Image (cartoon, rainbow, N blue to C red):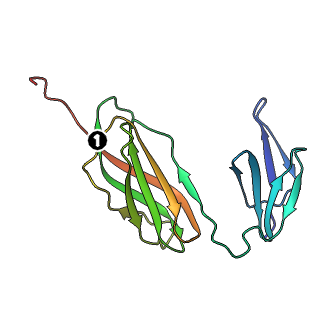
C-alpha cells in the first residue's frame, strides 16, 4: 500500500508532505520513533532518522496508553458505571483506572475481535472521584489498537440536607 507522510506546521497550520514511510510515530522517552513495515526508525538529534533494525529481536514489546484525567464535564464526584472499547488486540490487555485519589484499579481485558464493535469492559463500581484517567497496556507483547473509548460515569449528587 502506498503511503504519504504529512507534517503540520502548528504556527500557521500549513500541511506539507515528506518522503518518510511511517505508518505510525510515537515519542518514547525523549526520542521520536517511527514504525514502518520493515522495522523501527529512531529520529536522531539532527532531526533525521537512523534505522534501528530488529530492535525487538523477537522479544515482547511492551506498550501502554494512558488518557489525560477528565472530569466528564461535571464538578461532582462520580463512579464509573461502564466502559466500552472499540479496537482490536491479538491477546489480553490490562486496564488500569485512576481517580483523583490515586487509587488504581486493574482489570484484565479479553482480546478485542473487531475494530468497529464496542466491547463492554467490566469495571468495578466501588471507586469514586472527581477526575478519572484510564491506562491500557498489552500483555505478553500483544498487538493492540484502540479506536474509541466510551466511559459511562454515574454522577454522585450530595443530599442538600446532609
- Answer with left or right where residue 135 lies relative to residue 53: left
| Residue under the point 51% across and 41% down | 68
Query: Residue 11: x and y, percent?
Result: 77, 29
Please provide percent x and percent y for residue 99. Answer: 37, 41
Give the secondary structure at mark 1. loop
Mark 1 neighbour class, 10 Å CA radius: few under 14, some 14 to 19, many 20 or more: many
Q: In this view, does 111 lie above or below 104?
A: below
Residue drawn at point x = 67 percent, y = 73 percent: 59
Which of the 4 image quadrants contains residue 74? top left
Residue 155: x, y in percent?
26, 38
| Quarter of the image where one finds residue 76 | top left
Left/right placement of residue 88 relative to residue 74 reads right
As drawn, is 1 to the left or to the right of 111?
Answer: right
Compare residues 137 and 75 and report the one nearer the observer. Answer: 137
The quarter holding residue 156 reads top left
Q: So how many labels did they put on this image?
A: 1
Q: Quadrant of the C terminus?
A: top left
Q: In this view, does 111 lie to the left or right of 12?
A: left
**Residue ID at (51%, 46%):** 67
Location of residue 138 in the rendering, given as x and y in whole percent from the top left corner: 53, 65
Q: 144 above or below 33?
A: below
Measuring 87% from the left and 51% from the top, which residue is drawn there?
18
- Residue, far top: 161
Provide the residue designation for mark 1: 128
Amino acid at each position: 500500500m502506498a503511503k504519504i507522510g504529512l507534517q503540520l506546521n502548528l504556527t500557521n497550520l500549513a500541511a506539507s508532505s515528506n518522503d518518510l514511510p511511517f505508518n505510525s510515530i510515537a515519542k518514547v522517552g525523549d526520542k521520536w520513533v517511527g514504525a514502518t513495515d520493515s522495522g523501527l526508525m529512531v529520529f536522531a538529534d539532527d532531526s533525521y532518522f537512523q534505522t534501528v533494525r530488529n530492535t525487538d529481536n523477537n522479544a515482547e514489546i511492551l506498550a501502554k496508553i494512558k488518557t489525560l484525567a477528565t472530569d466528564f464535564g461535571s464538578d461532582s464526584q462520580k463512579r464509573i458505571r461502564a466502559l466500552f472499547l472499540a479496537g482490536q488486540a491479538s491477546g489480553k490487555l490490562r486496564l488500569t483506572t485512576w481517580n483523583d485519589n490515586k487509587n488504581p484499579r486493574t482489570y484484565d481485558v479479553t482480546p478485542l475481535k473487531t475494530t468497529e464493535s464496542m466491547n463492554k469492559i467490566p469495571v468495578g463500581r466501588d471507586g469514586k472521584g472527581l477526575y478519572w484517567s484510564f491506562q491500557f497496556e498489552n500483555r505478553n507483547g500483544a498487538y493492540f489498537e484502540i479506536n474509541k473509548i466510551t466511559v459511562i460515569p454515574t454522577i454522585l449528587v450530595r443530599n442538600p440536607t446532609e
